[in-house]
Structure formats: C-alpha cells, structure tokens
Amino acid sequence: MPSKHTAPSELVRAVYFEHVDHFGEPDRSIRFGDGTIRDGEEHFPPVIDVMIWRPDDEVEIGTFATIGMSERPMSGADYRVELHFAIRRKSFTEDEENRVARFLANMATYPFHYKTHLNWWHSLRDPGSIPLFSEGMSVLFHPRFVEDGWDTITHNDQTVKILNVVPVTAEERSLKNESGMNALFDHWAELNIDLFEPR
C-alpha cells in the first residue's frame, strides 16, 4: 500500500512547546504510530505521542497528555483538540503508565475513525476499559477545572482545545443525560467526589 512519511507540523510543535512551558519537560513520552501516512488514512494523525508528567512531592497528581491529535482537523469542527488525563496517585508503575497512555492514544483516534468531533462536555459512552478507574464506564470531556486554568492553545489563529478526560460511572452518565451538567455537579459536590482520584 502506498504511503509517505511526515514530520510534525508547526502547530503540533507549538502545542508541544506550550505544554513544556506549563509543565516542564515530560518525565516520559510514549509514541503510537510511526509517522507514516497510508492511502485511505490521510485524515488520521500519523503519530500520537503521550507525554507523562509524574507526581511529585508537591502535587500527587500525574498528568498524561496527547501531542499530535491536533495534527488533523475533525469533521464538523473549526478547532482542534488534545486530551489530558490527570490522575491522583503518589506514583505509577511502568505498566500503569503504559496502559493509561495506550488508552489515551486509542481514544485520540475516535473522532477520526467515526468522522465526528469531540468538544467540552461531550462524553463517550463506551471508551473501553479505563485504567485505574474500575467504576468508570464512560468519559466526560471537561474544560479547565478552575477559572484561571488552562484549556486552550492558540497558534496562528488556529485554536486547540484541551479536553480533560474525566471517568464517570454509569449512574453519573445517566444523571448528566437526564438532568444536565448542573445536576451532575451537585451530585459530585454532595458526595465530595475527587474527579482525579481513581474509584
């Protein structure tokens, strides 16, 4: 099958360097894909890198971020996206990092495979087994968690939204669908749910 190799675009390089500005150099990077564009797959990102920033003594949260999803436009959207998955843990094993990274990379192909788009407050009903979150049946894509948080990158008039992956239970997904996000927020507040804590 004919194919060609591609280098990261200026946009993806800018996305990477903005992550480094926010988090510092990643502790680890795992690559999915070899940069080859095959006939019939031109609309897929040729490479998804998952960058990992491990927990430290100050913040016991690990951050996993895709870099490369924004290489391609999504059907029906005038913006591009990358995924973040923050997990509260003191440390991760190599196997846990590998599993979370693969989960994110697989999810990053979803809008291109189904010729659709993802946005804040969208959810995926069945994203597959969510590493470390045994009760998580679906995922919700959350914007920034605090008012002065970070969830948008702009480069040469191109907007890249950061979609924060939040695992939700079957009950929480039903509550969101039936009663809306405010009802889900109230539910989380009532039970003092930590969205980053595996459950």
Image (cartoon, grey):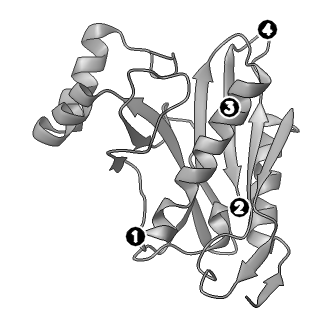
> Residue tagged by mark 4?
57
State the image coordinates of residue 26 (x, y, percent, origin top left): 84, 37
The answer to whether residue 191 is above or below residue 196 is above
Q: Quadrant of the C terminus?
A: top left
- Outermost residue, front side: 1
The reply to whether discs 2 and 1 touch (Cβ–Cβ < 8 Å) is no
Report the Cα–Cα distance between label 4 and label 3: 14 Å
Nearest to N terminus: mark 2 or mark 1: 2
Q: Amino acid at mark 3?
A: Thr
Report whether 44 appears left or right of 31: left
Report the Cα–Cα distance between label 2 and label 3: 16 Å
Report which quarter residue 155 is drawn in: bottom right
Would residue 141 be visible to someone looking at this image? yes
Circle on res. 116 = 1
Instruction: Out of 105 and 163, give the one closest to the viewer.
Output: 105
Report whether 38 appears left or right of 114: right
Nearest to N terminus: mark 1 or mark 4: 4
Residue at 30% from the left image edge and 18% from the top image edge: 188
Q: Nearer the viewer, mark 2 or mark 4?
A: 2
The reply to whether discs 2 and 3 touch (Cβ–Cβ < 8 Å) is no
Q: Amino acid at mark 1?
A: Thr
Nearest to N terminus: mark 2 or mark 4: 4
Q: Amino acid at mark 4?
A: Asp
Circle on res. 63 = 3
Q: Quadrant of the N terminus?
A: bottom right
Report the Cα–Cα distance between label 1 and label 3: 26 Å
